[in-house]
Amino acid sequence: MKLQTYLGIINSISNNCYQNGQLSKRKNYFAKKNSLKTLFDIGDKNEGTIILCEVGPDYTCIATADEQHKLHSLRYFSTSLDEIDANELSLHSFQKLVVHSAYPEALIVPHKYFDEQNSKQWLKEMFGFNESPQFHNAINEWQVTVAYTLPETIDNQFTNAVYWHVYATALKNCFGAQNQINIHFSPKCFRVMVKKGSALQLCQTYPYTTPLDVIYYLLNICQKFNLSQNATHLSLSGLIEKDSALYKELHQYFSDLSFNQSAGTSQLNEDYPAHYFTSVYQLVACAL
């Protein structure tokens, strides 16, 4: 049978979020670069027993936590992990490491079609990676498995890590409305999850540079899945503010918007909106 027959209605493709749509072959994983940009540096990075490392093509978020689901620190860099100095990670003093992949090379496969060997072949055929490590997270709540690949240098450096994908943790924490689009913004990309009725329709990551880029993708999604702009709830998280041009543009096209504030995890700092770090809170809820 053909690959698309196995995958059914749901798949997730990268859309050239970074150069040529390919994962770079990083020879010096922790090479220090002068271009490092720190967006947030909150709390004491020496506290806690667990390190959480969320990595994507356009950002890196490193947090520390404990077994009681309390976050102690968070540092957010608008750069990929290979541009961060090893001293920023301080891995030696932690008992557990959890890697949270935000790379878009992922497939969401119904349980009944999932097979580890087949998924490796599907990832290879769809994304062209022959040697990159491959992982999967089963999401029983939706009866699907998220299969994904990472830059192989991540697996080489973090041999004792626990791996999760952002799609997987979000699916365990995500929908409340009948028709809903969840949108999480990072510096250069945004990822979307779409639910219509009781069915998960789409998990996808898109690049953007202007608010109109986001509107273009969302209007196309609504048209494709026959979703009303007035009757679809948008749940927003990540790097977006209510007084931003991006939010104002979204509000012109969608009337039902709110910020996602994942419950069950204490906020690090009241000076920062909780929705900035929704993906980290979701990871804490799933992995600790």
Image (cartoon, rainbow, N blue to C red):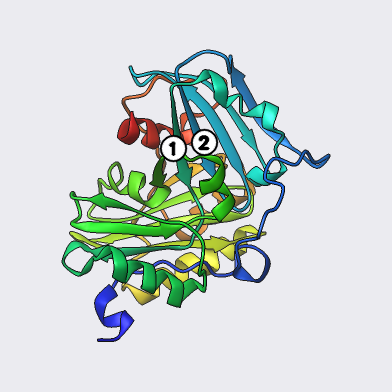
Between residues 246 and 170, which one lies in front from this camera angle?
170
- Expressed as whole percent of the image width and height from the top left, the position of residue 7 reads 28, 74
Q: Is residue 128 left or right of residue 10?
A: right
Q: Please, which residue is most extreme toward the right here?
A: 34
Height in image: 199 above or below 158?
A: below
Residue pictured at 47% horizontal, 56% vertical:
191
Amino acid type assigned to the residue bearing label 1 in the image: Ala
Q: Element at badge 2?
A: strand
Q: Which mark is residue 33?
A: none
Q: Using the numbered discs, state the Cα–Cα distance from disc 1 to disc 2 in whole angstroms.
A: 10 Å
Category of crowding for the residue at label 1, using alpha-carbon neighbours closer than 10 angstroms: few (below 14), some (14–19), many (at least 20): some
Amino acid type assigned to the residue bearing label 2 in the image: Cys
Between residues 248 and 169, which one lies in front from this camera angle?
169
- Expressed as whole percent of the image width and height from the top left, the position of residue 223 reads 38, 75
The C terminus - image quarter = top left
Closer to viewer: mark 1 or mark 2:
1
Height in image: 139 above or below 227?
A: above
Q: Element at badge 1?
A: loop
- Expressed as whole percent of the image width and height from the top left, the position of residue 163 reads 40, 43
Kindly indicate the quadrant of the structure image that contains residue 76: top right
Pointers 1 and 2 in contact (C-beta within 8 Å): yes
Residue pictured at 67% horizontal, 59% vertical:
209
Height in image: 10 above or below 147?
A: below
Q: Is residue 267 left or right of residue 145?
A: right
Question: Who comes first in sequence, dot 1 or dot 2?
Answer: 2
Residue bearing the label numbered 2: 53
Residue bearing the label numbered 1: 161
Residue 269 visible? The answer is: no
- Expressed as whole percent of the image width and height from the top left, the position of residue 108 reads 32, 63
